[in-house]
């Protein structure tokens, strides 16, 4: 069975942003994500990454995976609670909602997502 995979390669951000993900997910039994922050700087820097899906072409967004706020280098792994008898539909429109706060914050980070159909 083919596994779905999507990644955001290493990048540096200093302000909040949304990053569109392009993999068509459809129905999955499980989704997992790995967030790796390799550098963080600034005064009280904080970065929260939430994977969101939209079933209506981006008008409304639902949270799928929410990583803990990163304030320094970190490696986080999450599993979406979708291990059920029937598959869960993940909207084909996905994004990474990245919220960055602090004084002159800067984060270098990358993200990996996997799904099991």
Image (spheres, helix red, strand yellow):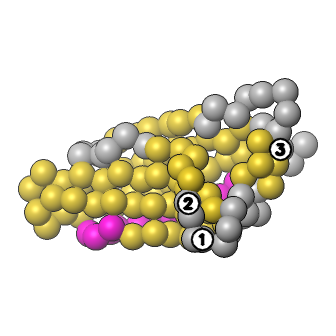
Up the image or down, 93 lies above or below 70; here it is below
Residue 6, given in percent of the width and then of the height, sits at 65, 58
Which quadrant would residue 58 be assigned to in this image? bottom right
Residue picked out by circle 2: 61
Element type at mark 1:
loop
Residue at figure coordinates x 64%, y 32% from the top left: 81
Q: Is residue 112 left or right of residue 101?
A: right
Q: Which mark is residue 90?
A: none
Element type at mark 2:
loop
Residue 74, given in percent of the width and then of the height, sits at 34, 41
Residue at figure coordinates x 24%, y 52% from the top left: 46
Count residues near mark 2 (Cα–Cα under 10 Å), then give few for <14, some for 14-19, many for 20+: some
Q: Which of the pair 109/66 is nearer the observer?
A: 66
Residue depth check, mark 3 versus mark 1: number of the one nearer the observer: 1
Residue 14 within the magenta-colored segment of the rendering: yes
Which quadrant would residue 17 be assigned to in this image? bottom left
Residue 93, given in percent of the width and then of the height, sits at 67, 66
As measured in the structure, the alpha-carbon distance from the residue carrying label 2 to the one carrying label 3 is 22 Å
Magenta segment boundaries in residue numbering: 4-16
> Which of the two labelled residues, at mark 2 and mark 3, occupies the earlier sequence position?
2
Which quadrant would residue 80 be assigned to in this image? top right
Element type at mark 3:
loop
Q: Is residue 87 left or right of residue 108?
A: right
Residue picked out by circle 3: 117
Q: Which of the pair 36/91 is nearer the observer?
A: 91
Q: Which of the pair 2/44 is nearer the observer?
A: 44
* Res. 3 visible in picture: no
């Amino acid at each position: 069975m083919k596994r779905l995979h999507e990644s955001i390669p290493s990048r540096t951000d200093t302000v909040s942003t949304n990053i569109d993900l392009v993999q068509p997910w459809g129905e999955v039994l499980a989704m997992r994500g790995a967030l790796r922050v390799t550098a963080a700087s600034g005064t009280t820097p904080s970065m929260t990454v939430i994977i969101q899906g939209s079933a209506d072409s981006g008008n409304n967004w639902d949270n799928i995976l929410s990583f803990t706020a990163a304030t320094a280098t970190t490696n986080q792994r999450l599993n979406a609670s979708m291990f059920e008898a029937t598959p869960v539909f993940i909207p084909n429109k996905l994004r990474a909602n990245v919220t960055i706060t602090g004084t002159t914050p800067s984060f270098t980070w990358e993200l990996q997502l996997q799904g099991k159909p």
